[in-house]
Image (cartoon, rainbow, N blue to C red):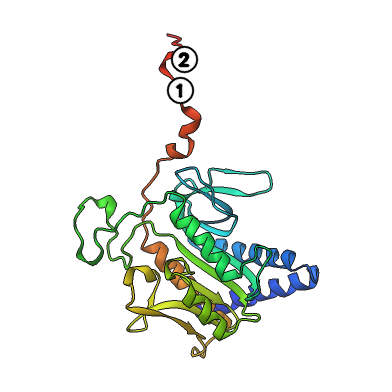
């Protein structure tokens, strides 16, 4: 067996789950989409390393703000993966434990949804909330590109390709490209700020969209390299050993694992999430000694 075969099996498994969901739920697009999301999270949780946990729910910022519902939240299992879980299984995840977040769609469409926004526009809106409104402070990797302003080991990730230690990777994963059209994708990617667009967009049955530098090497964080790159669409159809779906799934997994491997989530302080509950006045405290 080759590693290609592993992703071939994974792609076939995910596609089969999507098709069975369509048959079971018929015209109920929301229910069929939920089944795709559940099957994706189960697959990803199974194949990722033990230091990773895959959940769904909301991200809680240190400023106590809460994100919109998120399909896939990839967390550090060595930290507190979820502050608490509601009766319906919804997780509330501390932002300091988050490696990556994703939106999962059975079928991509440019059409506006109930929110009045397209999938891409809604993604951009949610990413801006997570990046800008939850009080997430990026920690600079002082070993990146020769930077040594802070020599503490806790601020270093050796041999890392990331300038940050705790950057959150955002992805949009669609089982099928559906009605996606190149000219519409170009418009959506050109009109939105690149730092709020998905770091990776996967249409598993067709292609992946990501940012490249001048050497056409994938860059996970387009805002870091500025104008020295561009968005590209790659069909990944050159590998003769496996299908296009497996190639796109394998590329997604590679970028995700590279991001996690280059990250270091040091923050273990949970007090900011709960400090409002433990406020008190010295005058109201009664000594029992």
Mark 2 in CB contact with mark 1 (< 8 angstroms): yes
- From the top left corner, tell me how far across and down residue 85 is, in percent: 61, 44
- From the top left corner, tell me how far across and down residue 283 is, in percent: 43, 14
Tell me which residue sits at (29%, 57%) in the image: 140
Q: Quadrant of residue 194?
A: bottom left
163 relative position to 7: left or right: left
Numbered marks: total: 2
194 relative position to 21: left or right: left
- Quarter holding the C terminus is top left
Which labelled disc corresponds to residue 284? 2
Tell me which residue sits at (39%, 80%) in the image: 230
Task: Return the residue nearer the eye: 4 or 193.
Answer: 193
Whether residue 82 is situated above or below residue 184 in the rendered picture: above
- From the top left corner, tell me how far across and down residue 114 is, in percent: 69, 64
Query: Dot 2 lies on which element?
Result: helix
40 relative position to 214: left or right: right
Whether residue 287 is situated above or below residue 278 in the rendered picture: above
Tell me which residue sits at (43%, 36%) in the image: 271
Counting other residues with Cα less than 10 Å from the Cα at mark 1, is it few (<14), some (14-19), or many (20 or more)? few
Residue behind mark 1: 280
- From the top left corner, tell me how far across and down residue 107 is, in percent: 66, 75
Q: Quadrant of residue 167?
A: bottom left
87 relative position to 268: left or right: right
Whether residue 160 is situated above or below residue 53 in the rendered picture: below
Query: Dot 1 lies on which element?
Result: loop
Q: CA distance from mark 2 to mark 1?
A: 7 Å
Q: Can residue 126 be seen here? A: yes
Q: Can residue 50 be seen here? A: no
Which labelled disc corresponds to residue 62? none
Q: Residue furthest top?
A: 289
């Amino acid at each position: 067996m080759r590693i290609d075969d592993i992703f071939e099996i994974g792609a076939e498994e995910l596609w089969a789950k999507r098709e069975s969901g369509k048959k079971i739920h018929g015209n109920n697009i929301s229910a069929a989409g939920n089944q795709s999301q559940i099957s994706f999270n189960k697959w990803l949780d199974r194949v990722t390393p033990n230091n990773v946990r895959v959940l769904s729910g909301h991200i809680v910022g240190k400023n106590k703000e809460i994100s919109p519902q998120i399909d896939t939240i990839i967390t550090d299992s060595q930290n507190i993966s979820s502050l608490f879980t509601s009766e319906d299984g919804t997780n509330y995840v501390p932002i300091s434990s988050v490696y990556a977040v994703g939106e999962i769609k059975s079928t991509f469409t440019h059409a506006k949804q109930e929110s009045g926004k397209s999938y891409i526009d809604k993604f951009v809106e949610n990413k801006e909330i997570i990046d800008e409104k939850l009080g997430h402070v990026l920690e600079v990797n002082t070993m990146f590109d020769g930077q040594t302003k802070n020599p503490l080991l806790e601020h270093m990730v050796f041999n890392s390709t990331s300038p940050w230690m705790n950057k959150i990777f955002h992805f949009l994963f669609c089982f099928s490209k559906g009605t996606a059209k190149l000219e519409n994708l170009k418009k959506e990617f050109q009109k939105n700020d690149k730092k709020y667009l998905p770091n990776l967009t996967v249409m598993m049955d067709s292609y992946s969209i990501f940012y490249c530098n001048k050497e056409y090497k994938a860059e996970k964080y387009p805002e870091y390299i500025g104008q020295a790159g561009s968005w590209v669409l790659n069909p990944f159809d050159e590998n003769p050993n496996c299908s296009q779906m497996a190639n796109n799934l394998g590329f997604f997994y590679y970028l995700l694992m590279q991001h996690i491997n280059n990250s270091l989530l040091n923050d273990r302080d949970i007090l900011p999430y709960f400090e409002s509950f433990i406020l008190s006045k010295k005058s109201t405290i009664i000594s029992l000694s």
